[in-house]
Image: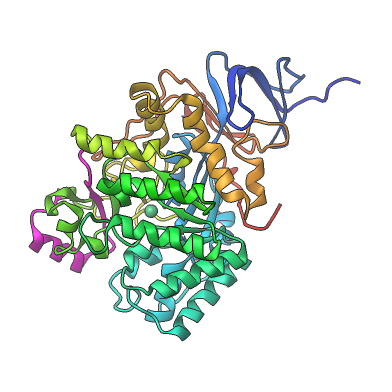
């Protein structure tokens, strides 16, 4: 019987599959959006691409992307991303967010968690949850008075009911920005973990504190997550351990390592930059809080104007006039060897996924790009000039391959690929069976693939300029190239929804 004819076969690449340990030259056949062969002999195919000299690996799965505009996701595709999930902040209502993304189309696969902060803003401050949910809700309503504080027992019940309903709609877990509501109750957080355990989904926490000053240290914030996992059995995922642990990374990493040895379900992620990014109205950026972070106003760059914030008075003014405005926070100085060692420790912590925390693009004048409806700036390709965002939004994976693998030798190529693809799939697959088909170059897996040159792949985004990565020759989503010969294709939107509980 003749071998079936594949839609496409990629020949000559060094194929790396982190799960099976395959690392050798193979031909990879793709049919109907799935991988249908991985072998030394190429099957007959309608189309053959010679990719000799390149590495072929599973496409990157970003657990932490707030860049949910078409332009933002295209920048991520050029960085090797084939699945970009909004899990830390999340959205409400979840069904509406999926419906909107499916109606508009997305260049890469997408999925959402249920947003605890949105639920709190709704229950405690009366913010309406509009049907076509977007991530803008969190930034827009920063300054409302009640959502950061303690909630009554009855209100906690209402918040948790909203989250349970959202998981029923396919949310991939519960996003918990507890660091933005540091005065919310410990009991509420613990009850939320109990809910996640009962529903069988993970939580994705931005921990309660960033500080080395007692009380309220980064370690205390991390221990709350570990204790909730230990005390409820929930799978608790800790977002960006690099930026929330900063100079307490040794203590935090030690606690996580020991908890895991004891069977506690805590997973972690990090991004390879010394600066963070958030909204300038965040509780932890209040002028009186900055010394706790070991920084002053000058370590803040207000993105809409590009200014370094001059002093406490200017910071207070910006927080009052534009609390949802984007800001880059220079926690660690990448030029300082001691700070660099702190940052690198996040990547020697075992089983820490690479996740970007990609941020929305901000146009001059400070309006974020949104996917549709009330668009403040055109969501077009190439990105309009003058846009700004944290470079992690466009360069995290290429920077990992250039800097952590090629230049620092901190991770092997296979380990970096594992942390960018298989590991995030494994973090989710207990709750999301669809992730068992991602993060692998194996027969039956989704054909979400990257083909790149390991010697030249590199990031170009900086703190002052948005620029795509280069070196990713082909990026395929469900078998469809969104990047072909290094060029973004704007005529295809092959991204598919990823939901919990569906096979
Ligand atoms: Zn984030």
147 in relation to 91, above or below: below
Residue drawn at point x = 22 percent, y = 47 percent = 331
231 lies left or right of 466 = right
Query: How is colour applied across the structure in the image?
Result: rainbow
Q: In which quarter of the image is residue 269?
A: top left
State the residue in front, 298 or 428.
Answer: 428
179 lies left or right of 481 = left
| Percent x, y of residue 393 | 37, 43
| Percent x, y of residue 323 | 25, 65
Query: Looking at the image, can residue 48 be seen?
Result: no
Residue drawn at point x = 62 percent, y = 34 percent = 440
Q: Give the range drawn in magenta.
A: 308-333
Residue drawn at point x = 38 percent, y = 34 percent = 468
Residue drawn at point x = 91 percent, y = 21 percent = 1
| Percent x, y of residue 132 | 51, 66
Residue lying farthest right?
1
């Amino acid at each position: 019987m003749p071998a079936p004819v594949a839609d496409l076969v990629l020949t000559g690449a060094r194929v790396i599959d982190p799960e099976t340990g395959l690392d050798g030259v193979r031909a990879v056949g793709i049919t109907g959006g799935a991988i249908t062969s991985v072998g030394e002999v190429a099957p007959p195919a309608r189309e053959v691409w010679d990719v000799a000299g390149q590495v072929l690996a599973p496409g990157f799965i970003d657990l932490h992307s707030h860049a949910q505009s078409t332009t933002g996701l295209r920048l991520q595709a050029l960085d090797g991303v084939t699945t970009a999930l909004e899990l830390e902040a999340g959205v409400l209502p979840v069904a509406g967010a999926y419906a909107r993304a499916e109606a508009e189309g997305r260049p890469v696969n997408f999925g959402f968690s249920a947003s605890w902060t949105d639920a709190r803003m709704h229950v405690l401050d009366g913010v309406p949850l509009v049907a076509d949910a977007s991530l803008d809700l969190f930034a827009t309503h920063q300054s409302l008075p009640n959502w950061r504080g303690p909630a009554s027992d009855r209100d906690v019940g209402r918040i948790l009911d909203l989250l349970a309903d959202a998981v029923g709609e396919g949310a991939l877990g519960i996003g918990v920005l507890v660091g933005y509501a540091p005065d919310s109750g410990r009991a509420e957080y613990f009850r939320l973990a109990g809910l996640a355990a009962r529903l069988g989904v993970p939580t994705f926490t931005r921990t309660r504190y960033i500080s080395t000053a007692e009380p309220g240290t980064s370690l205390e914030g991390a221990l709350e997550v570990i204790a909730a996992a230990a005390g409820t059995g929930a799978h608790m995922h800790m977002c960006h351990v690099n930026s929330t642990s900063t100079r307490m990374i040794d203590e935090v990493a030690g606690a996580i390592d020991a908890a895991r040895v004891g069977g506690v379900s805590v997973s972690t992620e990090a991004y390879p930059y010394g600066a963070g990014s958030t909204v300038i109205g965040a509780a932890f950026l209040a002028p009186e809080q900055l010394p706790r972070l070991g920084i002053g106003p000058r370590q803040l760059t207000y993105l809409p104007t590009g200014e370094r914030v001059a002093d406490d008075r200017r910071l207070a003014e910006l927080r009052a006039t534009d609390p949802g405005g984007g800001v880059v926070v220079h926690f660690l100085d990448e030029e300082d060897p001691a700070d660099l060692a702190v940052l690198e420790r996040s990547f020697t912590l075992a089983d820490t996924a690479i996740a970007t925390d990609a941020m929305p693009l901000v146009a001059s004048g400070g309006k974020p790009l949104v996917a549709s409806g009330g668009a403040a700036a055109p969501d077009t390709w190439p990105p309009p000039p003058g846009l700004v965002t944290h470079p992690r939004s466009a360069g995290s994976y290429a920077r990992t391959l250039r800097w952590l693998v090629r230049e620092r030798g901190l991770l092997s190529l296979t380990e970096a690929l594992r942390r960018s693809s298989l590991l995030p799939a494994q973090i989710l697959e207990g709750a999301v069976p669809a992730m068992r088909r991602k993060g692998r170059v194996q027969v039956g897996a989704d054909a979400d693939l990257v083909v790149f040159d390991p010697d030249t792949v590199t990031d170009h985004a900086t703190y002052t300029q948005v620029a795509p990565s280069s070196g990713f020759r082909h990026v395929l989503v469900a078998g469809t190239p969104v990047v072909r010969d290094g060029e973004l294709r704007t005529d295809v939107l092959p991204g598919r929804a990823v939901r919990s509980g569906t096979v």
